[in-house]
Image (cartoon, grey):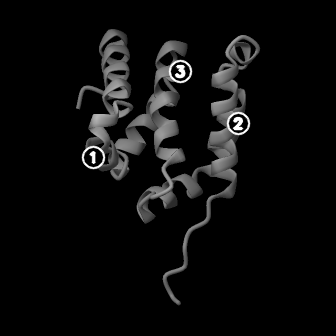
Amino acid sequence: RLLFPQASYVIKRASIQLLSTVLLTRSNYPIMMKYIASRHNLRTVMLLLRDPSPHVTLDAFHVFKIFAANPQKTPAITKILVDNRVKLMKYLDGLHKDREGVDVQFRDEKKLVIATLEGLEIEDDSS
């Protein structure tokens, strides 16, 4: 609940960094899977991607990529990503362009997230 967009810069930054560390720790895999299955959590991270602080947006990207890269996305998460795909791809394409030349890993992760969004499809349940 500390990741509300109206929280102070320090709280947002520290919270998103801690969240990223917790989610990316292997022993916390069940916690990560539960977290990235939540529509509310995805929406919160997407709001943080639009934060005025470049540090917060970079940290939010590292959490957002977990949602995008998850091969076992819930239908609700997939729908949000598909519904916002065009805006997300355009936004991510311009995100921290200055960093791409010096941070190859960031550049590659960004390309992977954009490609993943591009390939997303909502599964048809009617069969």
Quick one: label 1, few (<14), some, or many (20+) residues within 10 Å? Answer: few
Q: In the structure shown, which secondary structural element does the residue marked by tag 3 occupy?
A: helix
Report how far apart the C-alphas of labels 1 and 2 lie in the structure. 27 Å
Give me the disc on residue 58: 3
Residue to which mark 2 is pinned: 111
Residue type, numbered disc 3: Leu
Q: Disc 1 designates what residue? A: 30
Give the residue displayed 49% in from the left and 29% down from the top. Answer: 62
Tell me whether circle 1 and circle 3 mark residues in contact (CB < 8 Å): no
Closer to the chain start, of discs 1 and 3, is 1
53, 28: nearer the viewer: 28
Which of pointers 3 and 2 lies earlier in the amino acid sequence? 3
Q: Quadrant of residue 93?
A: top right
Residue 6 visible in the picture: no
* Circle 2: residue type: Lys
> Residue drawn 50% across and 59% down?
78
